[in-house]
Amino acid sequence: MAAQGTAGTATEPPPVPPPVSPGPPAVSPPVSPFVPPLECGGDDAQAMGREPLPLLRQILAACAFPELLESPALPEAARDRARRILREMDAGNIGGYNHEHRSHGVPTKISRFLEFRDGIPCDPKNIVLCSGTSTVIPFLLSLFVSPSRSLPPGVLVPVPGPARCSELSVLAGAVPVPVPLDESRGWAWNVPELRRRIRESRSRCEPRVLWVLNPGDPTGHVLSQAQMQELLEVAFEESLLLLADEVHQDLCFSSEFPFVPFRRALARLGPPVATELQLGSLWSLSHSAAAESGFRAGFLELLNVDPALLAPFQLAQSLPRPCVPGRILLELILEPPDERDPLSRELEKHRQDLRSLLASNARRVLQVLGRAPGIRCHPPAAGPRVFPKFEIPPRARSQARAVSAAAAAGAGTSPGAPAALPRGIPAGILLNPEFLGILNSKILWEFSGRGSRSSGFGKNSQKNLTRKFPAPYAG
């Protein structure tokens, strides 16, 4: 007899679901023989595991959330500094534009730092804040572009060097002119070669800018005072603006090769060079000891530049400016040292620890590379990279050509086309565009002929590589 429900009606039993087919067994994803790749090409130190300086973040936190000013969760040093910063902000709030802080407050503090570092006066009006140096460089170079001139401006760039030197020059409408550095002299500039490149480039451009990286990247070299004076004299004689890319200055770890700013070397030359040569110097928060890349802040200092040229830089909307937290970090990091200040002590310790770590890592890399046949590398003195030279023996080259030709014949493609590796052979080389730009620069210099007149490392360089280099090496 059926059971009775609450309403006196019979309750049907719930339906039984049909059996579920087991289906095919789950397939496990393939296991890679390699560890997950770590992106090391973009100078993003914190993405690679470097810890931020706690006191800097605590000050920023209190500025962004003023309720923390009374919280014992933050040290008194952080709260006290945040109070002083907020007093300089419009309505005590970092959420506004704070134009006075951008146009006067931070440039004044940066000028004090430069005066302390170099012992030379610095006018705050010469300081241009930027949202990363890559935003201000094309703007600066574009000022040399004039439709009334028959030839575009030329920018002399070092080889090897970052790909951005050529890329940003082209973006601004200029012509990059590669100048090879002298590896036998520790990647120093070869002044006779530099003068020759200037003369030869005049058929296709008008040389206007000499872009010098000090410390060098990716070579890790640091220029001596004598080398800097030679470059300054060449720039003066050729009426060039010398663009001193000094973003890695915090990463100099060799006591044998101390960093000397170009503005200090220029002052030592005296007039007329020191009073007439146009000099631009770059500093970047991303490449500093703090390595706060995400806040996108830096500055450009311009010396001996016509005030009419400075005017466009001072317009609020002329180029991307750093956000208020980025400007706060700039003024905190670039304050002159003060033993009584807890932040100053922590920053100095942080810099010393970082330099010791970089020096130790450089020694380890050189030891490993030194054990490998066919690889040699000049010891670096600064920066996060080394630049080894690979000497490929003739037998390896001939075998590579044979493999490439066989793969092309089997796939019905032309030599030099990408070929699949045989099954069971793992591939573990990862190249990013930045490295490829550096590699192309190196290949252009060493293999395309020192007399190459190629104007850049983009499509022209790829054409040169394909034409002048065997197929296996054309990529």
Image: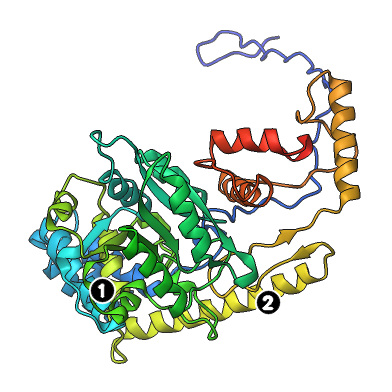
Q: Quadrant of the C terminus?
A: top right
- Label count reads 2
- Whether residue 282 is visible: no
Residue at 77% across / 50% down in the picture?
Answer: 34
Q: Is residue 231 left or right of residue 141?
A: right
Residue 56 shows in this picture: yes
Question: In front of the other: label 1 or label 2?
Answer: 1
x and y, in percent, of residue 9 in the image: 56, 8
Q: Amino acid at mark 1?
A: Ala
Tag 1 and tag 2, C-beta contact below 8 Å:
no
Disc 1 from disc 2: Cα separation: 38 Å
Q: Position of residue 269 (x, y in %)?
A: 31, 79
Above or below residue 211? Residue 398 is: above
Tell me which residue sits at (36%, 69%) in the image: 233
Quadrant of the rendered structure where residue 29 is? Answer: top right
Instruction: Write down the residue under mark 1.
Output: 274
* Residue depicted at x 61% and y 72%: 185
Which is nearer the N-term, disc 1 or disc 2?
Answer: 1
Q: Looking at the image, which is closer to me, 54 or 259?
A: 259
Q: Residue furthest bottom?
A: 340
Vertical position of residue 407 compared to residue 251: above or below: above
| Left or right: 363 in relation to 427 | left
Label 1: which secondary element: helix
Residue 13 vs residue 67, the one in the foreground = 67
Pointer 1 local density, CA inside 10 Å: few below 14, some 14–19, many at least 20:
many
Numbered disc 2: secondary structure: helix
Numbered badge on residue 26: none
* Quadrant of image for the N terminus: top right
- Please give the residue where the numbered disc 2 appears in the rendered image: 363
Provide residue 289's location: percent of width, then percent of height: 44, 71
Which amino acid is tagged 2? Arg
